[in-house]
Image: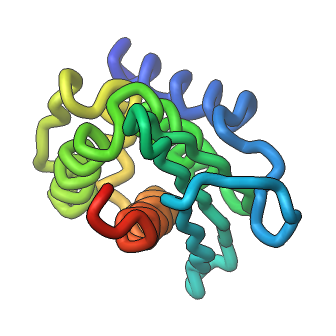
Amino acid sequence: MSDLQQLYQQVILDHAKQRYGNRPLLGGTGIDRSPQFGSSHQVNPTCGDEITVEAEIDPGTGALTVRWDGQGCSISMASASVLTEIAEDTGPEGFAAAEAAFHTLMHSRGQGEADEDVLGDAAAFQGVSKFPARIKCALLSWMALKDALAQAHAAGGDHA
């Protein structure tokens, strides 16, 4: 195993253990939330991984807050952690660019090169694209956040 593969493996393991953004969901708690709020629950029927992702856009600043809760393999949980970090650091537009790059990488069948400038720690999932059964695990939270953001933008009306 190359040094780069070992580094990537360590990044995934670290995110699987220390899950950034894995915090209590607002959902139906009655807690005040931004009018630009969306939530999406996704399930991978192949393996049973599941996740609920909430996206909240601050209408004043455009800042994005992501919360998630789920159960699944190290790849799906690490992927959710990484995407939360990217989304909160770059906002909705930055996440959209990263999501497109990640989607392309995951469907490259191991032939794609990860753009670390766009993907950050998500570049560590490059090797996952060689394993079709694991691609859905890696993409699960990304699909959920994309859906939650679409809801948040729709809820925001002209302010989105």
Q: Is residue 110 visible?
A: no
Along the line of sight, which residue is nearer the eye, 48 or 92? 92
Residue occupying image coordinates x 76% and y 54%:
32
Residue 88's spot in the image, x, y percent?
46, 33
Q: Is residue 81 above or below residue 134?
A: above
Residue occupying image coordinates x 73% and y 43%:
22
Residue occupying image coordinates x 24% and y 44%:
93
Residue 92's spot in the image, x, y percent?
32, 46
Using the rendered view, name the quadrant where residue 16 is placed: top right
- Is 133 on the left or on the right of 52, as rendered? left
The residue at the far top in this view is 3
The residue at the far bottom in this view is 45
The residue at the far right in this view is 29
Q: Is residue 123 above or below residue 111?
A: above
Q: Is residue 98 above or below residue 38?
A: above
Q: How is the image coloured?
A: rainbow
- Is 15 on the left or on the right of 144, as rendered? right
Residue occupying image coordinates x 20% and y 30%:
118
The quadrant of the image that shows the C terminus is: bottom left
Q: Is residue 46 above or below residue 49?
A: below
The total number of labels drawn is 0
Q: Is residue 153 visible?
A: yes
Residue 26's spot in the image, x, y percent?
77, 58
The quadrant of the image that shows the N terminus is: top left
- Is 160 on the left or on the right of 37, as rendered? left
